[in-house]
């Protein structure tokens, strides 16, 4: 399997070239084009119970699509995400990664998608009450609106609300005001997330909530 990400950082998409017998799994509606000879099967995202949990708590589709190459030569499928922005590839070797709801795009069959309670800190930070935990052995592709910046945290780091896309599970999230009470609210920052520990995080440069806040006043 060969995969390349093109169109970054604004309109990233993934070209996945599947060798004979290979499969790639993608979020529902992620396919923008594919070879006519590729097979596609829609399957529940886990068993029925876990699929429902992922759909209503993790922000993912009830079904995922399996693209299977049953031919004797390489075939291509091109995958995209719902919003304009960047996509990154992460190779997992038994480790885990926490994603914000809706960040998952695609993966190889050895990757497992689960949902765990994230806590009220995550909810107040604009990341949702539940987090998606991706684990296993294989390749994961995820993305978000805007560009994506990777940071190595060793101690503490501040991320604005709704900008934390992915983080390693050993990291802890704490909610706090951006500054003093007056500065936090009249300065437009409000609450921020303090990431504590040692590990990697991925930050999106734009947020959909920020876009909505900019557009809504102009519609009246």
Image (tube, helix red, strand yellow):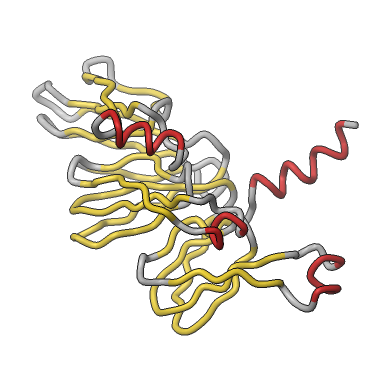
Tell me which corner region of the image, top left, top right, bottom left or bottom right, holds residue 46.
Answer: top left
In the image, residue 48 sits, relative to residue 121, either above or below, namely: above
Tell me which corner region of the image, top left, top right, bottom left or bottom right, holds residue 107.
Answer: top left
Residue 50 falls left or right of residue 172: left
Residue 91 falls left or right of residue 220: left
How many dots with numbers? 0
Kindly identify the residue that appears in the image at 24 percent across and 27 percent down: 67
In the image, residue 121 sits, relative to residue 19, either above or below, namely: below
- Quadrant position of the C terminus in the picture: top right
Kindly identify the residue that appears in the image at 34 percent across and 59 percent down: 97
Q: Position of residue 11 (x, y in %)?
A: 54, 40
Q: Position of residue 212 (x, y in %)?
A: 73, 41
Residue 75 falls left or right of residue 166: left
Kindly identify the residue that appears in the image at 36 percent across and 71 percent down: 170
Q: Position of residue 192 (x, y in %)?
A: 65, 67
Q: Position of residue 56 (x, y in %)?
A: 45, 35
In the image, residue 203 sits, relative to residue 198, either above or below, namely: above
- Quadrant position of the N terminus in the picture: top left
């Amino acid at each position: 399997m060969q995969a390349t990400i093109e169109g970054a950082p604004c309109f990233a998409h993934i070209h996945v070239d599947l060798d004979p017998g290979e499969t790639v799994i993608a979020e529902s509606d992620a396919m923008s084009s594919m070879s006519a000879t590729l097979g596609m099967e829609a399957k529940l995202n886990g068993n029925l119970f876990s699929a429902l949990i992922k759909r209503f708590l993790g922000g993912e589709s009830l079904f995922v699509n399996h693209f299977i190459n049953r031919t004797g030569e390489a075939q291509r499928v091109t995958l995209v995400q719902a919003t304009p922005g960047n996509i990154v590839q992460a190779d997992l070797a038994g480790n885990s990664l926490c994603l914000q709801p809706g960040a998952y795009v695609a993966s190889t069959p050895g990757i497992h998608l689960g949902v765990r309670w994230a806590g009220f800190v995550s909810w107040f930070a604009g990341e949702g009450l539940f987090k998606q935990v991706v684990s296993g052995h294989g390749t994961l592709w995820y993305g978000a609106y805007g560009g994506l910046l990777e940071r190595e945290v060793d101690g503490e780091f501040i991320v604005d609300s709704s900008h934390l896309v992915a983080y390693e599970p050993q990291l802890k999230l704490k909610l706090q005001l951006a500054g003093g009470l007056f500065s936090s609210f009249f300065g437009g920052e409000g609450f921020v997330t303090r990431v504590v520990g040692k590990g990697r995080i991925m930050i999106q440069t734009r947020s959909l909530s920020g876009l909505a806040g900019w557009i809504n006043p102009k519609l009246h």
